Image: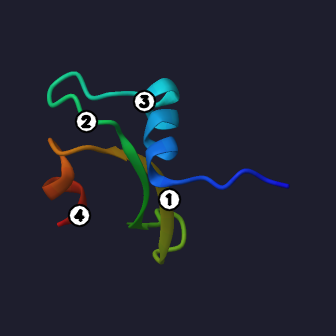
């Protein structure tokens, strides 16, 4: 049978393998942002996806 994973074991796993912010000390969460960029050749818009690391320092900038 599989071992159940609780919240404490998830945070311990993140502490072992996750990257921490050097400014605030929080572990990064990753989010995908989608930006609309005008296409130069066609004159229409295209979508660009980026993976962004989010911590308490830049949380308001990313989510606003």
Give how far apart the Cα atoms at labels 4 and 2 are: 17 Å
Identify the image quadrant of residue 15. Answer: top left
The answer to which of marks 1 and 2 sits earlier in the sequence is 2
Q: Quadrant of the C terminus?
A: bottom left
Label 1 CA crowd tier, 10 Å (few <14, some 14–19, many 20+):
few
Q: Which residue is mark 3?
A: 15
Residue at point 20%, 53% (across, down): 59
Q: Is residue 59 left or right of residue 8?
A: left
Residue 6 circle label: none
The answer to which of marks 2 and 3 sits earlier in the sequence is 3
Q: Is residue 41 left or right of residue 4?
A: left
Q: Which residue is mark 2?
A: 26
The answer to which of marks 4 and 2 sits earlier in the sequence is 2
Q: In this view, which residue lies farthest toward the top?
A: 22
Q: Which residue is mark 4?
A: 63
Q: Where is residue 16 shown, x and y percent of the image?
A: 49, 25
The answer to which of marks 4 and 3 sits earlier in the sequence is 3
Q: Nearer the viewer, residue 63 or 24?
A: 24
Give how far apart the Cα atoms at labels 2 and 3 are: 10 Å
Q: Is residue 58 left or right of residue 17?
A: left
The answer to which of marks 3 and 1 sits earlier in the sequence is 3
Q: Nearer the viewer, residue 61 or 47?
A: 61
Q: Is residue 6 left or right of residue 24?
A: right
Mark 1 against mark 2, which lies toward the viewer? Answer: 2
Give how far apart the Cα atoms at labels 4 and 3 are: 24 Å
Residue at point 49%, 60% (across, down): 48
Q: Which residue is mark 1?
A: 49
SS of the residue under disc 3: helix
């Amino acid at each position: 049978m599989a071992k159940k994973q609780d919240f404490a074991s998830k945070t311990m796993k993140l502490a072992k393998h996750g990257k921490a912010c050097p400014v605030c000390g929080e572990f990064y969460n990753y989010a995908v942002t989608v930006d609309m960029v005008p296409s130069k050749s066609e004159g229409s818009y295209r979508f660009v996806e980026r993976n962004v690391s989010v911590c308490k320092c830049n949380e308001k900038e990313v989510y606003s």
